[in-house]
Amino acid sequence: MNRSGEEGINEVLATILLVVLVVALAAVILSIVFGWVVLQPKSAYIPPRVEVLDVGGEEVISLTSKGGDPAVLTPGNIGLYSLSMYLDTPGGSEKVTPVAGVDTRNPGQTLYIYNDGTALWADYEFPEGELSPLPPGPVTLRIIDENAQLLVYREGLALGGGTMGPEPPCTLGTGWEIRNKQDYTFEYELRVKSSGDIISKGTIQPKKVIHLWYNKQSPYRAVLDWESGSFSGSDEKENTNDMCEFSRYETDFPGGGGGGPRNLQLLAMED
């Protein structure tokens, strides 16, 4: 029996399979490079021991690292994990600023958060000099992994002699992230798809991420429309996670840029 034709068929099939694999691999690489697929990085493991101390009649918050992952605290430092700290009060959310030279948070280190009347500061050293009161009443300390854009630690505190129940007061709603991956400014509008209610609208600067809280509980879909000159587009996401109220805040874009149709990217925040 003549089987000479079967060898030719096997060679053709092998060539076709090889081409398909190369095309699929190229598509995956292009999707990552141009931002069509966003790889969610691993978030930091941060287990602090949090205490409220009395310093000259004023309160100071101490955060002692019990282990976990090393991290950086200032933009521009090279590190897998970049942390930001926020103190949420009934009047809004305020970011804690590391003093000069406070660049890292490593296992065993203690940070002291205090108010000098101008801002909230974090320092390795026990604060000296005249301090101002921290916001009184129930507050929430949040630690954000800026690379992964995830909440890695949250604890409720009672300051100024206030009292707290088992859980801090919380108004539930939903959170959104709008990421500008480009080097130019966009005008945007974020709205609830079903009703058309405006969640937020305005301008987002280059290489910035805007975090928004909206007083509507999940689930619902939101639509983001954006434009910049001759560029325009839209993105749509569903939010199925409720989270406590916080004020809007803005951070640098975590990672490199990317082209493609989604110059602005809409993400639902997780509690």
Image (spheres, rainbow, N blue to C red):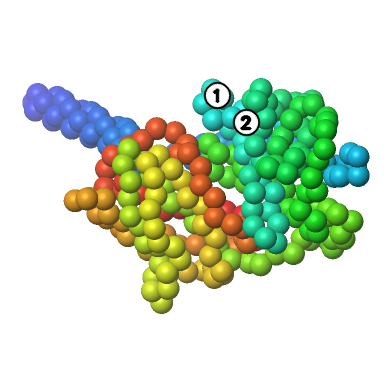
Q: Do residues under tags 1 and 2 come within 8 Å of each other at their CB atoms?
A: yes
Q: What residue does disc 1 label?
A: 77
- Give, as a three-letter code, the residue at label 1: Asn
Q: Residues within 10 Å of mark 2 (few under 14, many from 20)?
A: many
Horizontal placement of 192 versus 151: left or right? Answer: left
Q: What residue does disc 2 label?
A: 73
Horizontal placement of 99 versus 37: left or right? Answer: right
Point 50% across, 62% down: residue: 239
Location of the N terminus by quadrant is top left
> Does any portion of residue 28 appear in the rendered image?
no
Mark 1 → mark 2, Cα distance in angstroms: 8 Å
Whether 75 is drawn above or below 52: the answer is above
Q: Residues within 10 Å of mark 1 (few under 14, many from 20)?
A: few
- Give, as a three-letter code, the residue at label 2: Leu
Q: How many marks?
A: 2
Horizontal placement of 251 versus 10: left or right? Answer: right
Q: Position of residue 148 (x, y in %)?
A: 54, 39
Q: Nearer the viewer, residue 239 or 149?
A: 149
Q: Position of residue 99 (x, y in %)?
A: 67, 30
Question: What element does badge 1 sit on?
Answer: loop
Point 39% across, 49% down: residue: 204
Q: Nearer the viewer, residue 268 or 78?
A: 78
